[in-house]
Amino acid sequence: MEQILQTKLSFAPWVDPRTRRLPGVVPFELETWLEVDTAYGAQMALRDHLIATQPDEVMGLDESARPAAEELYDMVLGLLPGLGFAVSQDAVTRPDGVTVPLNRGAPIKTLARLMQNDFCLMQPDPSGASPESVLTGGALCFPSGWRLSEKFMKPMLRIHQPIAAYTPELAARVQRLLDGVQPGRGLMRGTASRSDAHLSDPRSEGDLRHGSNQSRYIRVERQSLVRLPNTRAVVFTIHTQIVLPEALTPDQAKALAEFPIRLAD
């Protein structure tokens, strides 16, 4: 499958000292949350294909999370006109010219066909079995080494298996971070890696792979947390960009030479 590439990186986490160092979390205003970048059309064509052919693999929604999914649907629709979408009562025409019917009864599918980023809903465990937030719904078309179906309705510690560094202590810190997200202002961090993997790289737990200094691509994920004000769910979004090294700006390339990124996919 041919790789889908951006012609430029809109966000290079190794450039800004705040996002270069762990944990690298910075606040942002909701007006800058969603983005339409240079690969929007190609990424959305692949997203449409995956949704049509593998819906159970790339989407999920627990019924307990439906109010949160509908709230996210309403929030995103309000942001789309400012991003170049034409929104009518019954449909949205995307920046690539594709018209998507509006269906609040299928909020995950509708949003997944509009938003370039993947998204997951994180909420208190509806069963009460875990003190951690669980993944209650979302759309994951462009994973880097994981599958939504394996993480659905799992708490954070279980989601991150088999990552040895994700200890119970780290899980507790992440939960405090999620609990601290407030409506009206999001939190964002970035990851960057050398990679040969395709944009859509679903892998089962334990299938760990690593890039090298000779890997062809640079993969960047802009990961954001946004609190929905009514249901109080936290939305975790992932905007993925993949570029060739020559697509970096001079400042990005200079910073990368000084602060090398990791090799793991």
Image (cartoon, grey):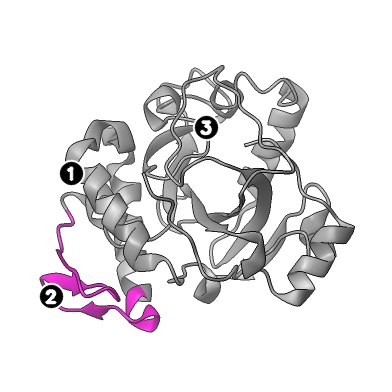
Residue at the location (66% across, 31% down)?
210
Q: Nearer the observer, disc 2 or disc 1?
A: 1
* The furthest residue to the right: 258
Residue located beneath label 3 in the image: 145
Question: x%, y% of residue 83?
Answer: 39, 79
Q: Is residue 160 left or right of residue 36?
A: right
What is the quadrant of the C terminus in the image?
top right
Q: Answer yes or no: do the residues labelled 2 and 3 have beta carbons within 8 Å?
A: no
Give me the C-alpha separation between circle 2 and circle 3. Answer: 38 Å
* Residue pointed to by mark 1: 52
Quarter of the image where one finds residue 53: top left
Tag 1: residue type? Ala
Question: Tag 2, which secondary structure?
Answer: loop
Residue beneath label 2, please? 89
Calculate the distance from the C-alpha at mark 2 to the C-alpha at mark 1: 24 Å
Seen in the picture, residue 35 relative to 141 is either above or below; the reply is: below
Q: Earlier in the sequence, mark 2 or mark 3?
A: 2
Badge 3 marks a residue whose secondary structure is loop
**On the picture, is 150 further left or further right than 192?**
left
Q: Which residues are magenta?
A: 80-104
From the viewer's perspective, tell me whether residue 110 is left or right of residue 27: left
Mark 3 and mark 1: span between their CA atoms? 21 Å
Badge 2: residue crowd in 10 Å (few <14, some 14–19, many ≥20): few
Looking at the rendering, which quadrant does residue 32 occupy? bottom right
Q: Nearer the viewer, residue 120 or 222?
A: 222
- Give the percent coordinates (x, y) of residue 190: 66, 54
